Every structure is written in C-alpha cells, then in structure tokens.
Image (spheres, coloured by chain):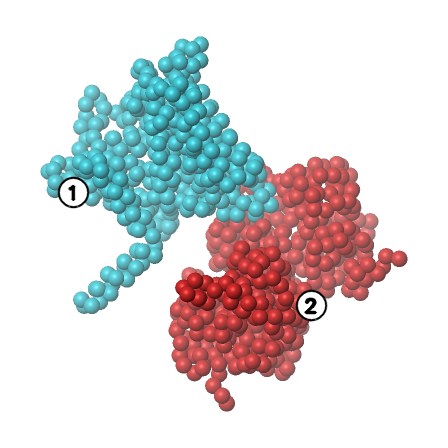
Amino acid sequence: MATKLLRMEHVNKSFPGVVALNDVEFSLEAGSIHALLGENGAGKSTLIKVLTGVEKMDGGEVYLDGNEIHVTSPFDAQKKGISTVYQEVNLCPDLSVAENIFIGREPKKHGHIDWKKINEDSKELIKEFDLNLDVTKKLGAFPVAVQQMIAIARAVDIKAKILILDEPTSSLSQAEVEKLFDIMRELKKRGLGIVFVTHFLDQVYEVTDTITVLRNGGYVGTYKTDELEKPALIGKMLGKDFDSLAEISVTQREAGENPEKFIDVENAGTAKIKNVSFSLNKGEVSGLSGLLGSGRTETARLLFGADKMTEGHIKIHDKNVSIKNPLDAIRCDIAFCSENRKTEGIIGELSIMDNIIIALQAKRGLMHVVSKKEAAEIADKYIKELNIKTPSRDQKIKNLSGGNQQKVLLARWLATDPELLIMDEPTRGIDIGAKAEIQRIVVDLAKTGMSCLFISSELEEMQRCCNTMYVLRDKKIVDKLSGDNITEANIMKSIAGEGEN
Amino acid sequence: MKKFKNSLEIRPFLALIVILLACEVLYRVMFGDSFFKITMVDGHFYGRLIDILRNGSKYVILAIGMTMVLATAGTDISVGSVMAIAASVACSIVDERILPSLHGNVFAAVLIALLVGALCGAWNGFLVAKLNVQPIVATMILLTAGRGIAQLVSDGKIVTINSDAYYFINGGYFLGLPIPFYIALFVLVIAIILTKRTALGMAIESIGINSESSRLSGILVSKNLWVIYIFCGIMAALTGIVESAGIKGADCNNCGLLYEMDGILAVALGGTALNGGRFSFVSSALGALIVQTISTVIYAFGVTPELTKVFKALIVVIICLAQSPIFMAKLKGIFSKKGSVAA
C-alpha cells in the first residue's frame, strides 16, 4: 500500500485540568474524504489545532508523505500544504474578495502589488467554484455561504495537499451544501486529502470514504464509511448502545387538558417585524417554524423586549404588561436563550457560577446581591441537574464545550424560575447526546407547567417536542398546527404556502 | 496561598515593594542616608514615604474612577479637563468671584465642584450610553472643550485663593498623616462597598466582557454605564479639588494636564485589562502609588529635568515587562538554559 498522505501517532495534549487528547492516532489518504467525528469535547477541535500548529502537542509524531514534520504555527502549516477552513469564516470582511484570496502572497510587479493580476486570477479561480461575482467588492457583502466557498477557494489555491473543513455546513442551506459536496468530490479527484468535521451524520454518509471517531479525548477507531451503519456509529460516538439512545428520544405529544393561557400577543410589532398575534399556554411546548429570515428570531426578541416594541399589546395572565427591555421581560417571568451563544449568550471571562446567576441577580436588582453561598448552591444544583461537565463551578465558561455552554445558559434562565422559556436554536452546533438531553429537558419543563417556545431549523426535532406550532413565512405567522397535525409534510406545506387556498 | 498568588493585587504590590527597596539601597549607596527616613515635626510625620502618600492620593482617587470605566471596556480621557473645571469652580467660589452669596464657604464650594464633575460625567455617559458614541471620541469632546469651560469660569485668569480651610484639604494632617490619604482611603472603601456589597461589580465586569450578552441577561447596560461615567466625573472633580488645594489656586491651563494618561497608566500598572473585564480597585490604588513613587524618586535622586520623562518611561517599561507573563517565561528560559550549560 502506498504511503499515507498524513499520519499522526500517539498524539497527547493536556490543558490545565483536562486531558484533551490521549494517545490519539489519525491517518489520511490522498484522494479521500475522511470524517472526523465525536461529541463536543471529544477532542476533534484539539486534534485539528495540533495539526495546524495553533496548539503545541505534548507528545506524538506527525508524518506528511512519510516524513516526520513539526508544525510550529498556522502559517507554517499552510506552507507545508495543510489548509483549514473554519466554521466561522476567518477572512477579513472589510477587504475585497480578491484581496482575501491573495492576502499574504500578493503577486508583485516592479515592487508594487499587481492588482490587475490579483483581480483576474481571483476571478478565474472562483469560476472553478461556480461563483461569478465581482471580486473587487468587499467580502462582507456576500452571504456566509459564498464567503465559505471563497475561503475554500483560497485554501485550495495555495497548493494545499490537505484541506481541513471544520463544520463548514452548519451555516449553509441544503442547496449550498450540495454545491460544497460537489466541490469536495472534485478536489478529491485532484488528489487532495480532505478532513471533514461535522455534526450532521447524513452528510457523513453522503460524502465521506472513511470515518475516525474520537470520544473523551481518546481514539475509538477508524472505519470504512460504507461498512459502518449509522446506529453503530452513534453508539461509538456516545459510548452507549443504540437501545439506550432510542430511550432518550421519547417524547410527549399530547397537549394538557384545558390548558391555562399564559401570554397573549396582540398585533405587536418592532422595527423588524409587524402585526404579530398569538398566544402561548402553560404546560405546552410551542414551536416557531419557518425558513431562515422568516421572522422566528424577531418574534422571540419581540416577546423578550430585546428589540423595542413599537405597537400592539402583550397580556400575561390576561393583564396588560409593558415590556420595554429584557429586564422587564425577566421580571414578567420570561426567559430567552439566544441563537447566538457566543455573542448574545455567554460572558466568556466570567465563571460558570456568575454566568448562571447573572439573570437572577438582574431580576432581583443589583442592590440585592445574591450571596456567595446561595450562588454556589444554585450553580452546583444546576451543574448536577443538567449534567454540565466541568471540573468546578469556578471554571470560566469559555473553556467549556458548546453543548455544556448551552446547558449553563439554560441554567441561567432556569435559575430565574421562568413561566415562559424561549429557546432559539438551542441545539445548533452541539452533539447528538447533548441535543437529545436538551430536547428532553424542554419537554420535562413543560410537564412541570412551564410554557416553552422552541425555535429550531430541524423539523424532526420540532415535530418531536412541540404540542403546537406556528409557521412563519415572510415575517408573518401563516399557520398554526397542533397535536397530530404537526408532521414534517404539513409544516413544509405551510412554509411553501400550499395550504393557503 | 494559591488564591493570593492568583489575585490581581499581588503583582502591583510586589512591583511597589521592589521599587521602594531598590530606591532604599541606591539611596544609601549614593547619599549614605535612608530613603525611608521619616521624622516627626509638630506632631506630623515628614519624609518621602509621606510625600508619596500625600501626592499619590490624587492618583488613587482618579484611578478608582478610571478603573470602573476601563473595566466596562470604555475609557475617559476627559478627566484632566474635568479636574481643571472643578478646580476653577471651587477656587472661584472660595474667592467669591462667582456665587458671592455663598461668602466663600469651602464646604459649599467643594460640593458644587463635585456636582459639576458629576454633570461632566453625565454628559460623557449620555454620549457613550445613550448615543453609542465610542468612549474615546465621546470623552475627547470634554478633553478639548473642558479647559475652555474652566477658563470661562475663571475669566481666563489663574485664580489664587486665600483660605486655610481650603488649604487643609491638601496640606492638613489627621493623626500625623496627610488629609489626602484619608480622602483616598474613604473613596477606596466606598468604591469597594459599592461594587462588592451590591452586584454592580459583576455588572461592570460582564458589560466589559460582553455587553450584548449582559443586556439580554437583564442588566440595564446603558443605565449602568451612565452611573459609571458620572462616578468617574465625580472622582476627577475630587482630584481637581485636592490638586488645587495643594497649589493654593486654580490654573486652568495646567491643572490636571496629562492626568488622564497617568490615570490610565495607574490602572494598567495595577493589572486591570484596558479592554474590559476583571478589575480591582486595590490594584489600581497600588498602581497609582507606583506612578507617584516614580516621580518622587526622580526628584529624590536629583535627575536633571530634561531626563525625567525618559527616566519615567524607562521605569514604566521595566514594570510592564515584569508583568508580562510571556516576557517572564522567556527570561526564565534564558536563565535556565544558562544554568544547565554551567552545570
């Protein structure tokens, strides 16, 4: 057999208090697409960081084309032919597309940058990717999907032998994903080795040849994709049998009898959305469905006072309330987990404990301080109840994995003892195990009488959790489904507007 | 012990001790006398340490206001001008140039000057919190306009005053120690109580780290910012009052000149990150004392005036390097390499 393009052996890496990688191996063949899978915190990101020189490994060897290499920095990795495209595009939005493609390696003519060549070559290059756009425009003007394509184009153009795609699909539409896959297959034909990190297992089966699974920083195994069935794969990722998984996904669907109404929204609107009317019952999970940009998040932000309400009324328990800012909403027992965990959720440098109690503290008022003792008790209670994986409550939240950060944010809101919990894409970008856990928590909370408003792009998840569902299209609520009518087919129909007549 | 090692206060504390000890050694070698010599005259302590305490107190007061602002990832570069405004208001009242109906009442003068400081802070806060102007730009307005306002108040003249009660604010003693020390101590205690006994401290940190997350967690970000800028304005005014009591008058062009930089320097030396987040008033107070110590040392050693700025910069560079973990790790690396070669 030919030498492997890349071989990593006995890789070890520890962070203070955590062993992130423990004797991990990984090998990649030229002209193949290799999925790197595992739950959040399994060590995928760390392995990639080690490979690309972002982090230094504590021990182990890396061989490229059979020769041992020592990658010292991301730049060094690029020079050696290892390119990475991250989930969050890390190009410069204020530079032009062409500048982004050539940054750091500008062609020169008479000591000056040859702009003509940059622009022409860029245009040529992105044509290969079926993109036809003005390369002199700012990168930030294009949708994330296009930016990602450009990032890949750049990576390929710098003569990469290995292309690492770290969750490239989480912000792409289905059509864009298809296009990305076409490109990946094309690159594979050219002999590139592609490492594909993702949470979407369907995509793994669609495009990859080989799968390597990590769990808790350890190496589980490497398998041929067509020889490993999905349930078995999930079992390997979670370290559980599939039977126990099936149990996680049990849900309740029956609505309570004579549900009590909690909140009534009448013709409310903000600068971003107008004429919103709906009501939510206690003890029920309600869903907001619709395409990206259909007004789901805007509706949630309206309820929570995150955007200023300019018209209409909100009634809670049949009494008019005025919600001018998030604090008002919190004092009306409303809680809101934003879809943007990093920018609108966590307060990275603060401890888990402070992150949990901050909303409760705000609700009580800054003058009525939550004592250290009480804060510790609350934090410990939720760390245990929600199964948050952390060495201590004093750990900074930014050091946790995505799924655990999400749980801390959930704890923040549960600590305020809300009557209405709004969750916008709470399961995006987190692993299956944590996903199922969060779904179950939502359903359980509704059982205790809480009213939950659940927003998710994954219809299957919505279908399983919701008692009632509002469907939005073009910033309007166009349909209400309940009980057994909540099927993927019905939702799609409403979204597409077929149920109108 | 570990907790102590990790606290923000330890580095500036060590830095201060090291500087003072170095001075003592050098001073004994050069002049055969103790740098720390403290004598008792008329029941008051005299000596360089007392001078550092008296003159450093101004920086401590200023740094406490600045710490709050910097911890919210903001900045206030108008404090020097606010000092000038407050000084000219207070001195003009004491001198009965304005508001003669108060008959030069010192207490009223101080109170009104503090109020004016609060007003300046409110203006900064309005721009930053309500209009979302970048803090450095917002406070630049008062930085430039402030001295003009101060000159309007004092008719463009240097206001000299003759009031023992007002002098007392800077030159007085209580239990043998200078009054500014007690003012600084009082302010420090108030600031600590304000932030630790309430959740204001956590709010400040969380706003500094991620203001949108804080807003969505129910923190009234703009209201809090407003309060913080007002507090900083009051602290600047208080500093201006102490300063003018020391020079027995208000000079609008020079009062508090470049103090904004000294204030920021004090906070930075104290270890509070200038882009927001964790902060400690005690650290900033220690940082302020370091700033003053450097000045006192320069005079004590008779460094020629042309060299004082260079000398000051040199000491600041050394302290900053000593506080940089990367630099210290490199230094350690060099030494351990040498050590192993020797062995």
Q: The red chain is which one?
A: A
Total labels drawn: 2
Chain under numbered label 2: A
Q: What residue type is labelled 1?
A: Leu
Residue drawn at x 27%, y 59% is: B332
**SS of the residue under disc 2:** helix
Residue drawn at x 47%, y 74% is: A81
Q: The cyan chain is which one?
A: B
Q: Can residue B180 be seen here?
A: yes
Image check: B156 left or right of A124?
left
Q: Which amino acid does label 2 sit on?
A: Ala
Picture quadrant of residue B187: top left
**In the image, which disc is placed on residue A175?**
2
Chain under numbered label 1: B
Give the answer, above or below, for where A351 lies relative to A26.
above
Image check: B122 left or right of A176?
left
Which of labels 2 and 1 is toward the front?
Answer: 2
Depth check: give the residue in front, A1 or A101: A101
**In the image, which disc is placed on residue B159?**
none
Residue at the extreme right: A501
**In the image, which disc is placed on residue B26?**
1
Q: Can residue A434 be seen here?
A: no
Residue at the extreme front: A110
Give the answer, above or below, for where A66 lies relative to A175.
below
Q: Position of residue A53 (x, y in %)?
A: 43, 68
